[in-house]
Amino acid sequence: MKGRLLAGVLLCGLALSACGGPASGGGNETAADALNRGLAAHAAGKLDEAVAAYFTTLSKDPKNQFAYYNLGEIAQRQSRFVAAESYYRLALDLDPKMESALFNLAIVRTNAGATADAVALYKQVIAVNANNAAAHFNLGLLYRQLGQTADAQTELATAQRLDPKLVAPSPSASPARQVTPSPTR
């Protein structure tokens, strides 16, 4: 299944990049150039251009986890959660410790009602970066939802210690927001 999805994504990307025109970046554009073009369009809110650029990136570098991640972020922003999850998982297949993909996938799984998956994903985020206040905060909210009060208090206290703006929330508090586009590192 994963192979078919990857093949479908790459075929779409090749089709988009074959369309030509200024958005395709030309024949000499590198994967890094296409990714940077996508990031610029993404930041400017030109999501269709960003998607085309990310697919161009993948046509030149099928193992570019940042292109997959950013496609996931756009899909998540557009409430296309199944697509977002697929892109985040493709990014994580390439880099299992990609903190932003783990974090956003946890949000997607929370919204899908898969609380146990989300808890596991937030724990993975914290394993990658123990100082991720938003992950501790969201994990604390999930623990509270599950009735695990002591664990919830511990996570929420850790979040507040790491980021004093994250105060112990009321039971109806909203989770921290998704991570934005990921540049190359």
Image (cartoon, rainbow, N blue to C red):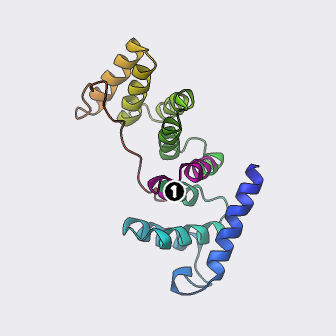
Q: Magenta region's main secondary structure?
A: helix
Is residue 133 within the magenta segment? no
Extreme residue toward the bottom, this view: 21
Task: Using a 10 Å C-alpha cutoff, classify the residue at mark 1 as few (fewer than 14 neighbours), some (14 to 19) or many (20 or more).
Answer: many
In this rendering, would 181 be left or right of 157? right
Q: Nearer the viewer, residue 29 or 136?
A: 136
- Give the total number of marks visible in the rendering: 1
| Image location of residue 99, percent across then percent down | 49, 42
The residue stretch that appears in magenta: 74-89
Q: Secondary structure at mark 1?
A: helix
Q: Nearer the viewer, residue 122 or 183?
A: 122
| Image location of residue 167, percent across then percent down | 24, 28
Q: Nearer the viewer, residue 97 or 43?
A: 43
Extreme residue toward the top, this view: 150
| Image location of residue 116, percent across then percent down | 55, 26
Is residue 88 within the magenta segment? yes
In this rendering, would 3 be left or right of 122? right
| Image location of residue 81, percent across then percent down | 54, 49
Query: For the point 48% across and 58% down, which residue is it?
Result: 74
- Looking at the image, residue 36 lies above or below residue 176: below
* Amino acid type at mark 1: Ala
Query: For the point 56% across and 41% down, which residue is it?
Result: 97
- Looking at the image, residue 124 lies above or below residue 148: below
Q: Which residue is mark 1?
A: 75
User: Which of the 4 image quarters holds residue 43?
Assistant: bottom left
User: Which of the 4 image quarters holds residue 138?
Assistant: top left
